[in-house]
Image (cartoon, helix red, strand yellow):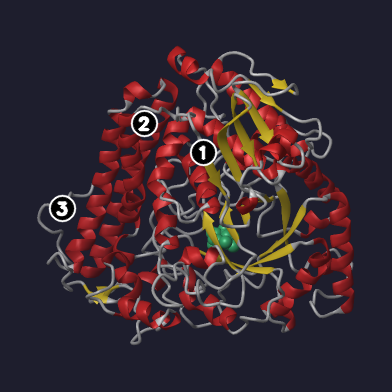
């Protein structure tokens, strides 16, 4: 059945014409006995994929190559590749080359990398070429990832739940691990490697001390043994106070010698059990989590202590910059920058500062975080949220590629025009070789992995952007559609149109014109702009929208919190000027009267109502567009998407009606002529 289990790795039988077209290029697979596990996994993936699509076994062979042989491997493991002297130098450790070559009157395709990992990525790309029915004649493709550590962060708890997870419970069957290793972990690893993910953080950033107990480490080790077959390293989230809470030290002060010794010994243990361990992810002194601040120490002192412990093994520490504190009366959007900017240059060389894409929290639209460009002497990575905590959970169709592209292409102007966020992330702007990108996973144990078919696109797009942060979100969407649904050009173009409009639709029906953080308390599903009685002021939507009889919005200019001063002058000048700022960010930076006139000539009040209506209209349009695609999609997946879109229309109206009703109770303005009446 078409339940989505195969993700984009669908190796379905091709039609006869296609089989005939490909058969001269795809006869057998040349392997070498000196392959280790990664290249062996690559060979079996290739055999599985090609045999599935060609409808006959494409065997692995060791005999001399002939016409139609596919040669895979590295110069060290494959004598054929060694003799071809291919231009592999520029590919680095993880790049690949796919090329048709002719030697001794024989024509064949070679898939090569300098390392087995590169070869594996090449194999997945080759399979995609065939899945997308691309021509193999004179094929010549090479690619190298622009970011070194491409990580998926699971927010999976040890009790089996997933924080902000909407695709069932955790994939990790903790009770049965380490003895019983589900084959699903292999399918998961295949999918991750197929989009270039090379690191998995297995547990929630709100970490429990127990994860560092021997029993849990052995469970993680069993997962890790599967991951490493696919070139994936394993990472753990750790709670800063772990040794103290396990009652093995008297404090968790990062400068205490017992604490330092405890972490070193623990790390040594981990590396003995998990040889491909990558390091730690840490949420410290943030949202009630313990951290160095509890001992009067800085984030740098805390991070460096852990970094020293993993450094002998080549490990890294990813220290999160998501901090804000209730004792601090400063605008929450400013706090991370204020706290970390002063520490630039103080972090150990194997620390990466992990910064959320925007300064608040994964909202449907935020301006880029001022720490991008703000920490020239520190490797800074971007953390995006693949799971849709604020964009409709499992069901709403919201393709996040355009959102991430918007952030990555934002120009920080820190070193003049062209200092984009992607250039911070890939290390080119400040010449950092340690680079990373993190996505908060949307994977769970649902049959379709991600809670809906279209959520798979977000996982796929994340991997593609991690590999190449300069890639276009539309072309990624089109590739995903070809791999997942159909290569028909008219299907691909219409379905990509739906995807490309979807995030803007959500931003409009939830938080248009720069509004943010209007969601209901706790679960964050649905609207709650009226909430203003929570214990922490910065948890209240009212803190952000500041709506009253006169107007609405958060003044972050000089007359307000002056958060704009954290950006380069070229950027802050744009954000500061109501006439120049992109109106999609208007109320993020400005508090304006309901009667303020926008570029369209309409008043702010009328424009807010209009934007909410537009959001609902877009949801309806997406559903109508999907109906026209009936003939291209199997009934099972078609109906699943159809049902999701019905939910989305209903809930878009819910958001619109609730927000407008609330804001109207404050503004006392009539609905503009032509506005959709609430339902
Ligand atoms: C959000 C989210 C929390 C999460 C936090 C984080 O606030 O709602 O569940 O723990 O981000 O990123 O640490």
Name the residue located 58 percent from the left edge and 19 percent from the top edge: 52
Element under disc 1: strand
Q: Residue furthest front?
A: 104
Q: Nearer the viewer, residue 545 or 375?
A: 375
The residue tagged 1 is: 140
Of labels 2 and 1, the one closer to you: 1
Residue 627, quarter of the rendered image = top left
Tell me whether the residue at label 2 lies in contact with that at label 1, contact meaning CB atoms closer than 8 angstroms: no
Q: CA distance from mark 3 to mark 2?
A: 26 Å
Mark 1 is surrounded, within 10 Å at the Cα level, by few (under 14), some (14 to 19) or many (20 or more) other residues, namely some
At 31% from the left and 53% from the top, the residue drawn is 509
Q: Earlier in the sequence, mark 3 or mark 2?
A: 2
Comparing 15 with 594, the one in front is: 15
| Residue to which mark 2 is pinned | 642
Q: Nearer the viewer, mark 3 or mark 1?
A: 1
Considering only vertical position in the picture, is 438 above or below 195? Answer: below
Secondary element at tag 2 = helix
The residue nearer to you, when weighing 24 against 485, is 24
Quarter of the image where ligand 1 sits: bottom right
Q: Which residue is mark 3?
A: 675
Q: Is residue 77 left or right of residue 29?
A: right
Q: Earlier in the sequence, mark 2 or mark 1?
A: 1
Answer yes or no: do the residues labelled 3 and 1 have beta carbons within 8 Å?
Answer: no
Left or right of 618? Residue 271 is right
The residue located at (56%, 29%) in the rendering is: 6
Query: Percent from the top left, x then y, of residue 575?
Result: 33, 76
When asked about the image quadrant of residue 344, the answer is bottom right
Residue 256 in picture, x, y percent from top left: 85, 79
Q: Is residue 170 visible?
A: no
């Amino acid at each position: 059945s078409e339940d989505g289990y195969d993700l984009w790795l669908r190796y379905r039988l091709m039609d006869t014409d296609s089989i005939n077209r490909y058969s001269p290029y795809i006869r057998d697979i040349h392997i070498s006995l000196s392959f280790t596990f990664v290249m062996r996994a690559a060979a079996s993936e290739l055999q599985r994929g090609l045999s599935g699509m060609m409808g006959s076994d494409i065997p692995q062979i060791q005999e001399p190559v002939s016409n139609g042989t596919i040669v895979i491997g590295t110069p060290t493991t494959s004598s054929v590749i060694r003799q071809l002297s291919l231009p592999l130098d520029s590919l680095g450790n993880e790049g690949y080359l796919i090329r048709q070559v002719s030697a001794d009157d024989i024509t064949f395709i070679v898939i090569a990398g300098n390392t087995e990992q590169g070869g594996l990525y090449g194999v997945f790309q080759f399979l995609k070429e065939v899945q997308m029915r691309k021509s193999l004649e004179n094929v010549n493709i090479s690619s190298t990832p622009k970011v070194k550590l491409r990580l998926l962060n699971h927010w999976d708890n040890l009790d089996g739940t997933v924080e902000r997870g909407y695709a069932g419970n955790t994939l990790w069957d903790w009770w049965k691990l380490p003895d019983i290793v589900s084959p699903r972990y292999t399918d998961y690893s295949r999918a991750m490697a197929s989009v270039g993910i090379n690191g998995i953080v297995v547990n929630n950033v709100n970490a429990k001390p127990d994860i560092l107990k021997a029993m849990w480490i052995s469970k993680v080790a069993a997962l890790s043994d599967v991951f490493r077959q696919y070139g994936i390293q394993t990472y753990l989230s750790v709670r800063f106070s772990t040794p103290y809470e396990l009652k093995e030290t008297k404090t968790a002060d990062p400068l205490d010698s017992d604490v330092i010794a405890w972490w070193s010994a623990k790390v040594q243990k981990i590396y003995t059990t998990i040889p491909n361990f990558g390091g730690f992810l840490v949420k410290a002194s943030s949202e009630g989590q313990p951290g160095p601040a509890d001992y009067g120490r800085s984030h740098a002192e805390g991070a460096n202590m852990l970094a020293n412990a993993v450094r002998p093994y080549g490990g890294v520490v990813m220290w999160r910059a998501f901090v804000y504190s209730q004792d601090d009366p400063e605008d929450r959007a400013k706090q991370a920058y204020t706290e970390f900017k002063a520490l630039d240059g103080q972090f150990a060389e194997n620390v990466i500062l992990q910064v959320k894409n925007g300064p608040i929290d994964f909202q449907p639209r935020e301006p880029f975080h001022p720490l991008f460009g703000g920490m020239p002497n520190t490797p800074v990575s971007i953390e995006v949220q693949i799971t849709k905590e604020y964009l409709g959970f499992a069901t709403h169709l919201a393709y996040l590629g355009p959102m991430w592209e918007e952030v990555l292409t934002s120009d920080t102007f820190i070193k003049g025009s062209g200092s984009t966020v992607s250039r911070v992330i890939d290390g080119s702007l400040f010449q950092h070789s340690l680079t990373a990108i993190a996505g908060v996973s949307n994977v769970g144990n649902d049959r379709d992995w991600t809670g809906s078919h279209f959520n798979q696109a977000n996982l796929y797009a994340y991997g593609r952007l991690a590999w190449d942060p300069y890639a276009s979100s539309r072309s990624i969407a089109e590739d995903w559609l070809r791999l997942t649904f159909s290569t028909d050009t008219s299907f691909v173009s219409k379905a990509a149109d739906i995807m490309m409009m979807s995030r803007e639709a959500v931003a409009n029906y939830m938080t248009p014109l720069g509004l943010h953080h209007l969601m209901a308390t706790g679960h964050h599903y649905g609207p709650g702009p009226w909430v203003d009685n929570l214990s922490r002021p910065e948890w209240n939507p009212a803190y952000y929208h500041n709506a009253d009889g006169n107007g609405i919005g958060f003044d972050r200019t000089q007359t307000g919190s002056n958060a704009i001063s954290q950006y380069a002058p070229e950027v802050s000048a744009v954000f500061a000027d109501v006439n120049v700022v992109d109106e999609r960010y208007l109320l993020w930076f400005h508090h304006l009267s309901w009667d303020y006139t926008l570029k369209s000539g309409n008043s702010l009040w009328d424009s807010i109502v209009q934007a909410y209506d537009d959001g609902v209209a877009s949801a309806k349009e997406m559903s109508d567009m999907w109906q026209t695609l009936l003939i291209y999609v199997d009934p099972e997946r078609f109906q699943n998407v159809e049902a999701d879109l019905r939910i989305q229309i209903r809930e878009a109206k819910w958001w619109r009606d609730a927000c407008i009703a609330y804001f109207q109770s404050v503004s006392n303005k009539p609905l503009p002529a032509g506005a959709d009446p609430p339902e």
